[in-house]
Image (cartoon, rainbow, N blue to C red):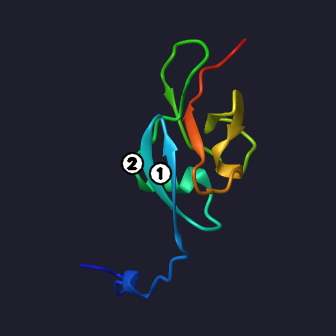
Amino acid sequence: MRLVRDQSRLIRRTPAIEFSFDGRAVQGHAGESVAAALWRAGLLGLRQAPDEGGPRGLFCCMGMCQECVVRLDGRNVESCRLTVSEGLSLSRAGWNR
């Protein structure tokens, strides 16, 4: 039983934009963060922890914790602060000490 009537058909999406993550095509929407698009695509492990190497992903979703960093042009960037753009090519981030 739903407490609130299903309103998903009322959502108006901005135009779809395709980018890639680890060579996989991912669809986002104009104005959306990369983190939100990756989460919706089921890609939750965005980097590896520096000590034990376990998967890390979204945590604060506002650019403070750096758990969601991905690689863009050879540098680590927070996916929650990066907006999707057509042809963007990202990969999982390692952690350089």
Residue found farthest to the front? 87
- Quadrant showing the C terminus: top right
Q: Position of residue 26 (x, y in %)?
A: 45, 51
Q: Inspect the image, locate mark 2, and give the three-letter code of the amino acid beneath it.
A: Gly
Relative placement, left or right, of 65 versus 17 is right
Tell me what residue is drawn at x 69 percent, y 33 percent: 73
Q: Is residue 95 visible?
A: yes
- The answer to whether 40 is drawn above or below residue 70 in the figure is below
Q: Which residue is mark 2?
A: 42
Residue that numbered label 1 is attached to? 39
Can residue 4 be seen here?
Answer: no
The residue positioned 71% from the left and 38% from the top of the image is: 77
Residue situated in front as seen by the camera: 80 or 54: 80
Residue drawn at (75%, 42%), measured in percent from left and top?
64
Q: Residue at x 59, y 52 (%)?
A: 34
Q: Secondary structure at mark 2?
A: loop
Pointer 1 with pointer 2, Cβ within 8 A? yes
Q: Residues within 10 Å of mark 2 (few under 14, many from 20)?
A: few
Q: Residues within 10 Å of mark 1 (few under 14, many from 20)?
A: some
Can you say which quadrant of the picture contains the N terminus?
A: bottom left
Q: Is residue 3 above or below residue 91?
A: below
- The residue at the far right in this view is 64
- Alpha carbons under labels 1 and 2: distance apart: 5 Å
Q: Quadrant of residue 69?
A: top right
SS at badge 1: helix
| Residue 67 % position (x, y) | 63, 35
- Circle 1: residue type: Trp
**Residue 42 located left or right of residue 75:** left
